[in-house]
Amino acid sequence: MKRPVAKVLNLNLGKREKIQQANSTILVVVVIASIVMSFALVMGNFLLKQKSYNDHVYKEKKIARDTLKQNVINAKGLEDKFKDIEDPKSLANSQTILDALPGDYDNPALRTSIESLVKRNSLSIESLTSVDQEGQVAEKAVDPKPVEMPFTVTVEGDYGKVRNFISDLEHTIRPMKVTALTLNGSDQDMKAEISVVTYFQPTREIGITTKEVK
């Protein structure tokens, strides 16, 4: 009767070993599957980020390419217009345009111009005040816009000459706007204090920049 009991015990031990082996196999499979899944997720995330980065680079390169193409077109148009301006039959030329809206902040030249205009109208100048911002304003810009240059001039003379002087100020090739006017005295001996704003426009510079794509 003892031998059958031994056989039953041996069978039970065999089943346990098989169960333990199966559990170990399942654990190894689960661990390997987890590692593979984690690696796949990491790689997937990396590839998505890389694709997004490449898309951004492509977009910025396309923008830069289109900008360069447009700049070439604009340059050709400017060249053609410049040739038209410099044509001997043209009423204007590049120097006239620069006189109308100078590309640099030249306060002494402005004062000389005003003094010459006063003298041409046979008036005497009592004072000429302006804010000299030489070196304080940018004379080059990627997107230039007119910059105000205010000044105040006080002249003396008869009314007709003062009136002509003001008219000349407003009709000079350089844009000038009278912002305030104070008159004192008689028609034959009048003093006029005139506040004026004129302009200069910084020269355009090529804006070459670099951009970091993230």
Image: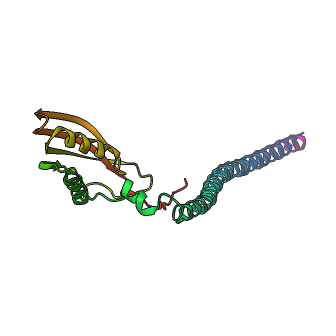
Q: Is residue 170 visible?
A: yes
Q: Is residue 211 magenta?
A: no
| Residue 101 at least partly seen | no
The residue range painted magenta reads 3-7
Q: Is residue 152 left or right of residue 178?
A: left
Q: Position of residue 118 (x, y in %)?
A: 20, 51
Q: Is residue 114 left or right of residue 85?
A: left
* Residue 4 included in the magenta stretch of the image: yes
Residue nearest the observer in this picture, 53 or 60: 60
Quadrant where the N terminus sits is top right
Is 137 in front, or is 201?
201
Q: Residue at x 34, y 45 (%)?
A: 171
Q: How many marks?
A: 0
The reply, left or right, for residue 195 in relation to residue 9 is left
Main SS of the magenta part reads helix
Image coloring type:
rainbow
Looking at this view, is 132 or 91 the one in front?
91
State the image quarter where residue 182 is shown: top left
Where does the image place residue 162, in percent across and percent down from the top left?
20, 41
Of residues 80 and 38, which is closer to you in this image? 80
x, y (%) of residue 176? 31, 45
Percent position (x, y) of residue 148? 30, 46
Give me the residue at 18% from left, 51% from top: 122
